[in-house]
Amino acid sequence: MCLACEQDAIWFAYLESRGLLKPDDPAAVEALFATFPVQPLPVQPEPQQAANPPAVSAKNPFSCDDPTAE
């Protein structure tokens, strides 16, 4: 489990232990975090592709998306 996922799990366990969060209740999660300010992320434009781009295999840097990661 990556550090960010582990921190989220600890945070949710803490909230649940305090009675602030009901397990498997998306409405409760939305209500809890609705008061936090949200800043939208800037959208980056798509990179222009050349007529004959070279084959590039990019490895996903996010281990949360990789089921074989620890």
Image (tube, rainbow, N blue to C red):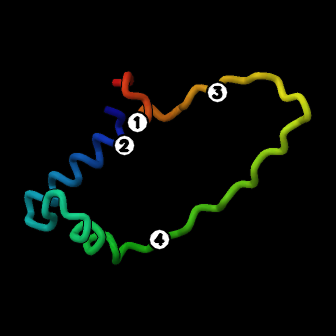
| Amino acid type at image mark 2 | Ala
Residue in view at x 24 percent, y 46 percent: 9
Q: Earlier in the sequence, mark 1 or mark 3?
A: 3
| Residue tagged 1 | 64
Q: Position of residue 30 (x, y in %)?
A: 30, 70
| Mark 2 or 4, nearer chain start | 2
**Picture residue at 53% right of the left edge, 31% below the top:** 61
Residue ID for mark 4:
38
| Cα–Cα gap, marks 4 and 1 | 23 Å
Q: Give x and y (percent) for residue 44.
A: 71, 55
Which element type, helix, strand or loop, lies under badge 1?
helix
Whole-percent x and y of residue 26?
Answer: 25, 64
Identify the image quadrant of residue 16. bottom left
Q: Secondary structure at mark 2?
A: helix
Circle nearer the N terminus (4, 1): 4
Mark 3, other Cα within 10 Å: few <14 / some 14–19 / many ≥20: few
Q: Quadrant of the C terminus?
A: top left
Q: Nearer the viewer, mark 2 or mark 1?
A: 1
